[in-house]
Every structure is written in C-alpha cells, then in structure tokens.
Image (tube, coloured by chain):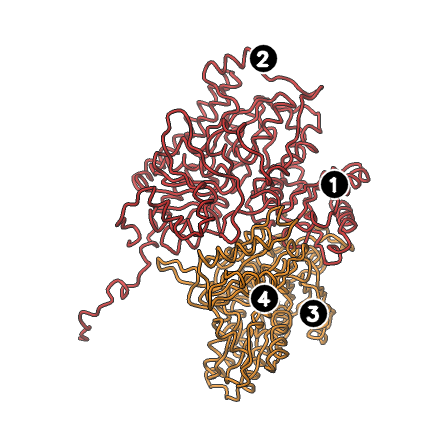
Amino acid sequence: MLLRHTPKEVTERSALVINPAKTCQPIGAMYAALGIHGCLPHSHGSQGCCAYHRSALTKHYKEPVSAATSSFTEGASVFGGQANLLQAIDNIFTVYEPEVIAVHTTCLSETIGDDIKQIRDKADKQGSIPKGKHVIYCNTPSYVGSHVTGFSNMVKGMTEVSESTGKKNGKVNVIPGWVEPSDMEELKRLAALMNVPITLFPDTSGILNGPLSGEFKMFPEGGVTMKELKEAGDAIGTLALGEWCSADAARNLDAKCKVPCRVLDMPFGLKATDRFVDSLRTIAGTSVPEEITRERGQLVDMISDTHQYYYHKKVALFGDPDQLISMVEFLVSIDMWPVHVVTGTPGAKFEKRIKELTAHLPFEVNVKAAGDMFLLHQWIKNEPVDLLIGNTYGKYIARDEDIPFLRWGFPILDRVGHQYFPTVGYKGGLRLLEKILGLILDRKDRDDSESVFELTL
Amino acid sequence: MATKNKLVQWTPAEVKEELLKKYPPKVARKRAASILINEALSNTTPEIQANVRTIPGIITMRGCTYAGCKGVIMGPTRDIVNIVHGPIGCSFYAWLTRRNQTDAGESGENYMTYTFSTDMQDSDIIFGGEKKLKAAVQEAYDLFHPKGICIFATCPVGLIGDDIHAVAREMKAKFGDCNVFAFSCEGYKGVSQSAGHHIANNQVFRHLVGTEDKEKEGDYKINLLGEYNIGGDGFEIDRILKLCGITNIATFSGNSTYNQFATAHKADLSCVMCHRSINYVADMLETKYGIPWIKVNFIGAEATAKSLRKIGQYFGDKALIDRIEAVIAQEMLEVKKVLDDVKPRTEGKTAMLFVGGSRAHHYMELFGELGMKTLSTGYEFGHRDDYEGRAVIPTLKVDADSRNIEEIEVEADPVAYKPRKSAEELKSLEEAGYTFKEYDGLIPDMDKGTLIIDDLNQYEAEKLVELIKPDIFCAGIKEKYSIQKLGIPLKQLHSYDYGGPYAGFKGAVNFYKEIDRLVNSKVWSYMKAPWQENPELSATYVWE
C-alpha cells in the first residue's frame, strides 16, 4: 500500500496539512501571465519559487515555460528586493526582449513588504522599460488563498491596463479562468461560431500547446495582446467564468471602465455550457447557430445512450472550486452521486454551493473547502466510491483503494491530452463522458465473471 | 535533418563571445568568468568562477536552499516525517517530484508518498507560527508515531523569526521516543541548492549519525554517500554490492532510514558518489569516527568496476577481491553484448551536459563508453573544487553568501573514534597508488578547447545548441522542451525522463539503449511538412 499510514478513523487536525489539494498563489499568477502575448512572467522572490513553478507547469504541459526570478539572496531579504527587481527588469528587456514583464510576488517579498508599484515606477523613470513595452504586476502572498487566488490576482492585474475611451467597441470580454489551452481554443471556437467578437484573457492556447518544428520561440504566436487588454475597457460586457478565478478581474473592469459583467460557472458539462452559450448570445445580441445546437444534442444523446452506467455511481472529487462546482453539477445531471468533494482552496461559499447542488440527493455529501487529500482518502475508506476525479496525485489513493481514476485538474503529470482536447463546452462534455464511461466499463470488463462477460455494452 | 548541418565551425573563443554579446556590460563581465575555455596547463588546472550569485532576471536552472535540503537530502529518507513550516507551495512542489525510489522494507514505514505542511496563513506571518508548528508536530506524532520528525524552514520563517529549533527541542523532550530536529533552510540562503545540501547534512550529522550504538552484522562495511536512488540507482548499486559480499550500512540518503543514519559510524569505509553534496560529511565521519573515505563513481560500467576494485583494494582481502573480479566478469558479459550492438550507432556523436554538482562529470563516463564526445559541460550548483579538484579547497574564499552556511567543527569522539587502518597500512596502500579523499574535478577530464560553463542559463543553452549543434543535450525538466523545440533531444539527468536506473552495470545497459533511442529517433526528421520542404508548386496533379 502506497498510503499505508492513512488511518480510516478521521481525527481533527488544526495545524497539520497532509497531502494538500492546493498549492500557493504565485504559480497561478505565472500560468495566467503566460496567456499574454509576448509576456515573460517574473517571480519576485527566491529563485526556488520560480524553479518549482516552471517545473510543475512544464511537467503538466510538456512545453517550454519561460519565467524569470529576482533571485533573492540573504542580503535582499534583509534590505528589500528593489535592487534585484530593477536589475532583473533591465536584464530581461535587454536579453529576452519581451513585450511585457508580468511581475508577481512571493511570500518572501510580501513578508518584507516590497512595493512593486513603486519599484516599477522607478524602473520606468530610470529608463529600464523600453518605449512601448510594459511591466504589469500583482501581489500574490503565498500565505493567503491558493494557486487559484494567484491566478485571479494576475488576471485582475491585467485589467489594470484596460482603459475606457467612452466608445464601446462591440466586443465581449471572456475571462475563461484556469482552464487548459485546449479549453481556451474551444471557447474561442464557440464564440466564432456565434459570430461574437471576443477578447479572451488570459489565453494560453498556442503558447502551452505549441508544435515541434525545429524552432524555439520564447514568445510564441498565441496570447492576448497588451493592445487587446487595453481595449477590454471598451467592451460591451464581460463574461467571467468561475467565481474564484475570474470574478475579481471582471468586477474591476466594471468599477474601472464601466464594463458590465456576469459571473458564470465554468462551462463544464451540459447545464453550465448552456448558461455560457445563452449568456454570450444575449450579451452580444446574436443567435445560436444550428451547429452549436447540434453539438448540444449530441451530448444529450450520449447521456441518454449510456445513462445506465452512470446511474447512482458514487464519485469522490478533489480539485479547484470553480471546476468542482461545474463538475458536481454535471455529475448530478447524469445521475451520478458525488459523495466526497474536497478543495484545498479556502472559502465557505464553496461548501454552500456544493450543498445546494446536491441538496436533492438522498444523502448528505461530504464537502470541505480548505481540506486535504489525506481527509479525502479517509472519507473514501469510510464510504467507498466507484470513481475518483482529480489531479495526478489521486493515483496513489486510486491504486490503494482500487478505484477507477479520471485525471482532471492541475497538475496532470503522468498523462497527456489535456493540452489538446478540451473538456469545456458540449464537445468537452462528450470527452468527459467518453473518459468516465471508459473507466467504468473497463472496470466492469475486468471484474465481470466469465459467464456474464459481455460483447456489447 | 537541417539542424545537423554544421555550416560554420565556431572556435571556442567565438562561441564565448557570442554567448556574451547580448548581455548588458555588467552581466557580460560576470558571466565571462563563469565560462571557461579549457586549456591543457602543465601543472595546474585552469580556474573557473563557480558558486556565485545568480543574476536577477537571467533565467537560471538553479533552485533554492530549501530544495537542496528538503527536496534532495532529506526527501528520500522514508521513515522520517518531514514537516515543512511555511505556506503550502514549498511542501507541494517537493512532494514526490524527485523520483527517489523507495522500498518500504520489513518495517513497512514509508512516508515518501505523503507531504506535510503547516500551511501558514497570514495570521501566522503576523503573529508568529511557532504555536501552529508545535501543534502540527504533535498531530504528526499522534497520527504516525514515527522515529523522527524533521522541520524545514521556508523563506518567511526566517524573516518572522520563528525559533524552529526551540520548538524541535521542546517536542523531542516531550515525546521521549521521537527525535525531532529542524533545518534553517530558508530559500534565500546561499546561492543555490548546494547551501541546502550543506544545511541538511550538518543537521543529520549533529542529530542523527552515531545515535545508535548497536553493532551491525556483515563483512566489508561501507557507507555510500551522495547517492539518492533516482530511478532506482541505489537499488542497482546495492544489488552489486550484495553480489560482491560488501555490506552497505548507510546510504546518504537514497531509500534511507533513520536507523541507517544512526548507525553510519559503524562502517569501515565511506564511499562518496556525489562529491558536491556530501564530501564534508565524509570528512566529518573520518574526523569523528576514524572512517576513511574514497571517491567512487557507479555511473558507467568501467567506472563501476573501478570503484568496486577500489573498495576491494581498501579491505585488501583476497576472497573479496576475487569475488569482485568474478562479479565484474559476469556482469560485463551483458554490458559488452549491448554495447557492441549500440556503439556503432552512437560512436562519434556529441553531447553537452549541464546538470547537478557531480552528474555532469559522472555521465561523461557513460557517453565515453558509447564513443560519444562531450563538447561542453558545467554544473548547476557546483563549487570550484567540483571543477578544479580538491586541491583548491584551502584557497576558496568565504563570501557574504557562504559565511552564513554553518561549518561544524568536529573532533574525534572520545569513545567511538577508532582508526580503521593503522598508519602503516595506510602508508602501504598509498605507496601502492591508492588515493584517499581525492577528487580532481571535472576539468582534467575535458578536452582542450572545450567550453566549461558554470550556472548555464536559458539564453546561453539555446545559443550553444544553435552554434555547436550537439547530438544530445543533458539538463533538467525546465530546459527540456525549449531545447527539443530546436530539434535536439534532451535527456533529463535529474529525473532521467522517468527511466533508469543508470548506475551500475544494469544501469549502464539501460543508458546505452536510452541514448541510442534518443540520438537515433526518427522523430527529429519530421520537423518539416512536405509542403514546407518544397514550397514551390512545380506542377499540378493531373487527375486520371
């Protein structure tokens, strides 16, 4: 047994987190910043933070992840990191020539109290920021929230460059939240099918799912441009997908540039995608083309074709709040039973939302925000499940407890596909169902006795 | 393959100039001292700048002190509960990410699959985190009752002044049956992971080594220092040692246990694999307990044979020496068979190695066995002695960054110190050409005119590949895909690309096959689509 020391009996823990279902803010900020065209993310802290974040993102995407660091030493930690950041900005623009540097902080620079805005302005004054280039930033103290908070903070940081000219440009801002490059591509495809001009930010498609062609571009073709971010202030509205990932940025745009916003769930599964498509339609004043309605019908068709295999199957899930909310809704909509739900990200709203979505079920769901995978495993030991959904770290529980395991979330370190095949939208729903069904039926085929083993399922 | 056409042959001086050309003057000056064009000097080894600060903004391969301490050294110790005191990230990123393979053994204790954190929140940063740390240590003890609990400081801990050592002392005294100690390994200390190795090893030596006095059974007792069981390297070395009848008391620290460290002073010889991360522990074991040390290398079949013979010669027992020769002869059969098959396809190809504090040197052996030439190499976190040999150690200057990394003063233990060899025995070994505590570094093994580069960064790596076009580049995960985008395979020598083992005889066989696979893979010929190779339409297709 890989997790042999995990006891079935749940005891209260007030201080010790074991096997977390979250990580820290800066990696979220780094991922978000990679979704800006020509952007080099910069970690203002010790070089280890940057190394860890780049490693984790690289392993997840199997793509180059470029980012720089202020490489704090003990001296910088005592006297502040201003000199390091000024030098870094100068070196980065000289050597790597990005369009924009997106600085995020770390627990180290936050504890010292470095004022990034002041340092950036100083860099600007002393001529270290070439004309037409940018340094944007956000604060990401690692001891608050989680990686999701850091993502949200950097996206909010992007809206700081948005300006309102007073004249609407007819575009819709779509803030996708922390989803895969493939998902971002899918959202753009859906909007294009509906003839809605959108500004998607961040947009990591083209950046973290690039081709192999004998060329290395530190700044590939994809990503939202600084010009588009600036013009986001003139959009007719903003759709923010995911309360945790995207709402702060959307509200900031509303407050700053009077761009009205709607906060939706991330479009995973039938109903959340319905709401996304319907909202986009109403905001932009267009109609939904037959092609999208047909894709929806295909998803409904697949649910009806295979419903018997999902019906009342118990599921345990861990991951990030926005994703879990939509996934729980999707599972419930196909009559699966989410019994244990854990996120590491704090927030009482999460527990409330999951309880609402599962209120009609004949049992009370175990749900915890600021929980960990040790607790989830204990819950599973007490009430076994038919399916586990979460990031790669779940494979240890899945193997010990012999549970079919759907890799979904961040990070996925041992499988590929998430870069290329979306799970948002109706097409993404088909893919999720195909995966879930495959897992359930592989298990059935493994466990059925020879006498009941079936050819057709 | 377009990338393999060497249109221009750059001289080393030109390459160096190209690497520095784009830097601001200050950066260029600093980097110039870390880029050495190797010269064959008659009596000395050329000097290189190493173990100096990373330049802010320059995309480095390096990690932090915490990574070196918790991730590298203590990470593979399977029956100690390692609690990270800090915000959640540091614990998360060091969770199962180093590929230290583990066998839970008879005791069944294995916490490697877990990660433990105090998950500090802003209130802990403001009001102090000692109370939470104590509660976390207590909760870990109540849940697992381990033999040992270790505490690791992350960046903010040093700044807010939590006394983790006082917490450790208090909890150790309270439990009575659980050794609790702490590491001040804040990420901002030192200039690289190397400082963390030092901090970890010092504390292991101070709090753990020699704490159990039980005699260990077995003949020819050694410690294996600086072997971390990445991809099962340690398992393969242990297999070979066992075949030879050599008893490994303690591996520092692959698949290690509390008890192995505690009885390490019972060994009669320390064998140092990774010189960078642990040579000072070998020194301390010698000073305190009288255990001599030698440098070994189990990377490469010939190097493995040489290292085994060196161990045999130390013990000087004919039965052992004969058995070692028999094992080598037996194991080399398979090695030779595979090498004979692979070598015609690898011979003459070229490699670059930028990794670690010893691996860049060790893996040159394996490439040499494959008939491949190492064109350029360097360490990520090495010191000058890893390049130039131990002779430079007395001349190394203490600077602002190394000053705060503790050197422990060790004296001979009044009870446990026992010379393993008499002065006459040592003398006769040395007269026969035997060398103790000797390491000449990487530079003497590199050809004249090759480039040796310390702390190579993203920009320089890309330039090197562009200009020199090696057949394979060896570094880590962060470098892997940017190099491969250029059409050159990158072999990860930190994590082995999830393969291995590469140590010992079976490891050599694995490596030969792996390098053959990489440098001869067809994928590198697929870069361009047919319509990109021949963009001009010369004729249109005529439908029949």
Residue mark closest to the camera, 3 vs 2: 2
Q: Are marks 4 and 2 on the same chain?
A: no
Chain coloured red in the rendered structure: B
Pointer 4 local density, CA inside 10 Å: few below 14, some 14–19, many at least 20: many
Q: Is residue B5 visible?
A: yes
Tell me the kind of residue under disc 4: Met
Closer to the chain start, of discs 4 and 3, is: 4
Q: Give the residue at x 57% y 26%.
A: B270
The mark lying in front, picked from 3 and 1, is: 1
Q: Chain of mark 2?
A: B
**Between B173 and A143, the one nearer to me in the picture:** A143
Residue A350 - label: 3
* Front residue (pair A425, B162): B162
- Residue identifier under label 4: A154
Mark 2 residue crowding within 10 angstroms, few (<14) / some (14–19) / many (20+): few
- Structural distance between the alpha carbons of marks 4 and 2: 66 Å
Report the residue marked by disc 2.
B422
Chain letter behind tag 3: A
Q: Chain ID for label 4?
A: A
Query: Do discs 4 and 3 share a chain?
Result: yes
Most extreme residue toward the front is A126
Task: Tell me the residue that label 1 is attached to.
Answer: B165
Considering the numbered disc 3 on the image, is that residue within a helix, a strand or a loop?
A: helix
